[in-house]
Amino acid sequence: MARMPSSSPCPHFPRTNRRHRGVTLLELVVTMSVLAILTAVGIPSFRALQKRSQVDATLHLLTSHFASARITAITHNVPVVVCPSRGDGMCRQDSDWSEHWLTFRDPDGNRQPDDTFDVFRNEPAPHTPGLRLLSTAGRRQVRYLPTGYSSGNNLTVRLCIDGEVSGLVVINNAGRIRSARPSEPEPCVPPG
């Protein structure tokens, strides 16, 4: 068998004499138009996804904070309070939960920590631009009894982003915690 001589260094890829061409202006304009359309459609969806993710994370953190306080009250057989704080180790007197969350044992019922060893947790709330956490009028803190009950009326903490309620954390009299999302858009107004 005789082999045929090849003019190409590689027999599978024959040599061509075509000139290498660049991208035409029309191709560039079409590509940029498609990219602009995809970006215009994708950015609002991404922002909505990011907002929902931030709300979900905050709902989970706050719910787990309340659940931890309830379990602590039951296991240590002592009343435990969860309240909003400014980070100074004392409970706030308003309904803004946006800065810190304080959990402490409260055997004397004065609803303020008496000593530093009474404090179980003093954590900053998640810092998200435009996020506010506000409890509804009435109850401003939760006091769990050693039975796990939280007597008094329900406490609802509203998660507000950009002036709209995006999530709720509700604690009932039995001490049970649930989170929810509003079914319709609702403006976030501080309790008066």
Image: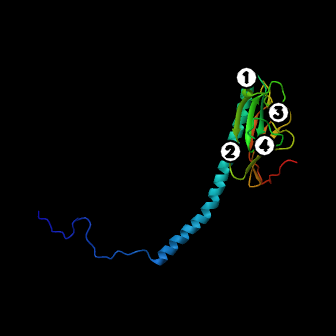
Q: Nearer the viewer, mark 3 or mark 4?
A: 4
Distance from label 4 to label 1 (Cα)?
A: 26 Å
* Residue depicted at 64% across the width and 57% down the height: 47
Where does label 1 land, which residue? Answer: 76
Circles 2 and 4 in contact, beta carbons < 8 Å: no
Where does label 4 land, which residue? Answer: 157
Q: Secondary structure at mark 3?
A: loop
Distance from label 2 to label 3 (Cα)?
A: 26 Å
Q: Amino acid at mark 1?
A: His
Circles 2 and 3 in contact, beta carbons < 8 Å: no
Q: Earlier in the sequence, mark 1 or mark 2?
A: 1
Q: Amino acid at mark 4?
A: Val
Q: Is residue 153 left or right of residue 178?
A: right
Q: Earlier in the sequence, mark 4 or mark 1?
A: 1
Distance from label 3 to label 1 (Cα)?
A: 20 Å
Where does label 2 land, which residue? Answer: 126
Most distant residue in the left direction: 1
- x and y, in percent, of residue 65 in the image: 71, 36
Viewer-proximal residue among 56 and 108: 108
Q: Residues within 10 Å of mark 2 (few under 14, many from 20)?
A: some
- Image height check: is 1 above or below 112? below
* Residue depicted at 67% across the width and 50% down the height: 52
Q: Amino acid at mark 2?
A: Pro
Distance from label 2 to label 4 (Cα)?
A: 14 Å
Most distant residue in the top direction: 77
